[in-house]
Image (cartoon, grey):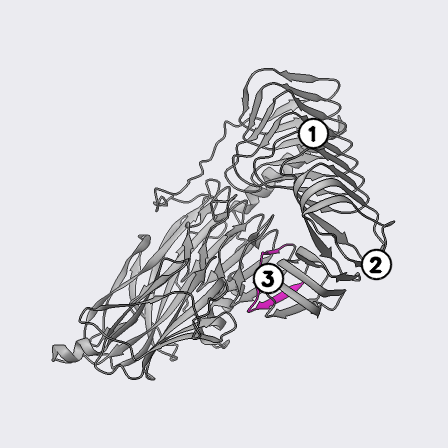
Amino acid sequence: MKKIILFIMIISFVFVSFCLAQTSSTFPQDKIDRVILNHWYNCSKFTRIEEKRNINKNESSFSFGDTAILQDRKKFEKDNQRETLYIGPGTDTLFIYSDYEQDGNIFIIGEGTLLVDNAQLTISGHLYMQDQGQAIFRNNAHLFFNQYYYHQYLLYLTDQSHFEITDAIFDCNGIMHSTYLYDDATFIAQRTEFPVWSVKKIEDNCGMILEDINCAGQFRIRDSCSVHLTRCNSIMSEFQAPDGSDITITFPNGYWVDHFEFSDSAAGVNGIDYEFVADSCAFCTWAIETFPACSVIVNDSQLCGSTIRMTGTGTASVEGIKQDTLYSNFRIPVYDRYFQLVNTHINYWWWFPMDNTILYVDSCEFAQITGSGNSEAYVTGSHHGGGQGEALMGAAENSFVSFIDGFSSYYVYTLDMGTFLIVDSEIITQCPWQEVNIATNQSNLLCVNSYLDPLPIAADAALVMFAAIDSPSTVMTGETVDIFGSAWIEPGPENPVAFEQYKLYWSVAGSFIWTQIEESANQVDDGILAEWNTSGLEEGDYDLMLTIFDSIGDSLIALRTLTLIENSEVEEEIISNRIELLGNYPNPFNPTTTISFELNTVNTEDTELIIYNLKGQKVKTFSNLQINNSTNQQIVWDARDENSQPVSSGIYFFRLKSGKEFSETKRMLFLK
């Protein structure tokens, strides 16, 4: 009974918190503005335009504008018809012998039992078990979580609860799934098919036994738990190195593991309380999760990955750390711990700033960066390459994460009340078990002058904002020119915020004196933001600033510099000054890509196209460009350097330069 009362109190608290969230803003406006403007101007001087607004930020209802911008995207609807199924307390038992669908959560509490025999249970919600509750799936039973994105629905075990699945299927709609074990819970799986990757977090005194499992998945092992795997394959075991632990280890070759034990009784392992045993297992990979005040040395090993968890109030800066790299003797530059790699190859890096820590990342490759607590992470010029297991990049709880001048080949995700800001970056999702870039709960996903495929969506009470000025880059003086871009928001179905307006301004570059071009209450997705009349303006560089507003006064800005050149009466002279880098296709690419640009100029001697790697090193230079009679010029790059040697997979930059007057850079990804 106490557990039921506790659950009712939790639900009541969540409801009150949600109501309060509708009347207050979790939008870190100052932090967002500072990051965007410092990136743009590389300084802190900026005079903000004061808007005269009759907005009451405590309003609890708003008029909903047209937010259905892209009809081909997944739209989440508010559903008040979902019901929670309770099993227990007491010896209450639910038997399922034919296919059953539950549109909502299932709570098994107080010794209640769920038994599924030779039937499919489809759940559009969480499966939560506590207080010795148990669930048993057997005899070709099929557990199906009908989820659309990772972490949407969980299997959660606590308080001596018990989950057992034998000769069955554990499926999650093709999306990666998470299982959490706490407080003496147990999980047993035998001869069961897991069609997609799953993440299992085992803490406290919990136990997990897997036998004859084809895709065992990822294990995060902590505290005093026990994990035993027998005749399993496709395993990634992530071993925690807690405060005070002292570990010096060489991991075995994971292709086939006859017997491997990681525990305090294993040679070179001290200061841990859990036990992991793998017997007769194949395709095993290993990872280390380090905490402050630990000491870890990994020798002569192949590591799948390294998780760096930052706690407390410290600050760390990392630069140039790469994935898929052999380190002969390398100490990770986070100095609240000792973590050294000796003759060890590491595939992926996972970074977790927590509490009140601050992390700066520059020119790195990583599989995951997720902020939590009140942490901050500032990521520049880096490649989010995904990896085995969790591969998301984003913000959780009350954290703030920014990603500037970067490229992601996986996906982005915000939850809780986190804020994730993407500036001048490309997100091209290629994750096999996650198809969406998404904001959930009450989080903010903010995109500025960036390209995302697919475009982000909002669930729950989350908010997506998108501001971009795409083109042009060169304009003739005296012309009235179309300014192309995007200005829209998408609130989740439980978020009453709506789009209010956008404003577009121009300024002589560096003057900080802004003149309004356009003000509109209509959202724009990849279209014309405004017509700009340049009559009376002198040639030179000009800044454009787009500001979009929601209905409670939160805003997002995007900036772009363009060049005005003198308009000649001679058509040939007009044509001769037109230069623009258009992009490349396909992107990502293998084995070749076509780079397109406009270059109708009589002076080609000083014009060149240069390919750079992520370190900024020149890879290939195309000079003395041969110009044809068409506007659109093209060069095919075959992913080879100046010596005709094939380059490695990864992110590359291509820059079009023409004398001192023009230079533009774009990014591309080569995949092998």
Task: Name the side, left or right, on which 189 lies relative to 264.
Answer: left
Residue 216 drawn at (x, y percent): 65, 39
The amino acid type found where label 2 is placed reads Gly
Tell me, for residue 244, which label it has, or none. Answer: 2
Residue displayed at 63% across by 69% down: 318
* Of residues 501 and 537, the one drawn nearer to the viewer in this rendering: 537
Q: Quadrant of residue 588?
A: bottom left
Image depth: mark 2 or mark 1 in front: 1
Residue 57 drawn at (x, y percent): 48, 52
The amino acid type found where label 1 is placed reads Gln
Q: Quadrant of residue 151?
A: top right
How many residues crowd around disc 1 within 10 Å: few (fewer than 14), some, or many (20 or more)?
A: some
**Does the segment drawn in magenta span residue 367?**
yes
- Tell me where the magenta segment starts and ends, as one range: 357-372
Report the number of numbered marks. Answer: 3
Tell me, for residue 190, which label it has, or none. Answer: 1
How many residues crowd around disc 2 within 10 Å: few (fewer than 14), some, or many (20 or more)?
A: some
Task: Name the side, left or right, on which 632 lies relative to 409.
Answer: left
Residue 466 drawn at (x, y percent): 41, 56
Residue behind mark 3: 323
Q: Tell me the CA gap for discs 3 and 2.
A: 27 Å
Q: Is residue 389 above or below residue 177?
A: below
* Of residues 528 and 279, the one drawn nearer to the viewer in this rendering: 279
Tell me, for residue 11, which label it has, or none. Answer: none
Whichever of labels 3 and 2 marks the residue nearer the N terminus, that label is: 2
The amino acid type found where label 3 is placed reads Gln
Secondary structure type for disc 2:
loop
Whichever of labels 2 and 1 marks the residue nearer the N terminus, that label is: 1
Would you say residue 360 is visible in this rendering? yes
Task: Name the side, left or right, on which 623 lies relative to 433.
Answer: left
Q: Is residue 36 above or below residue 272?
A: below
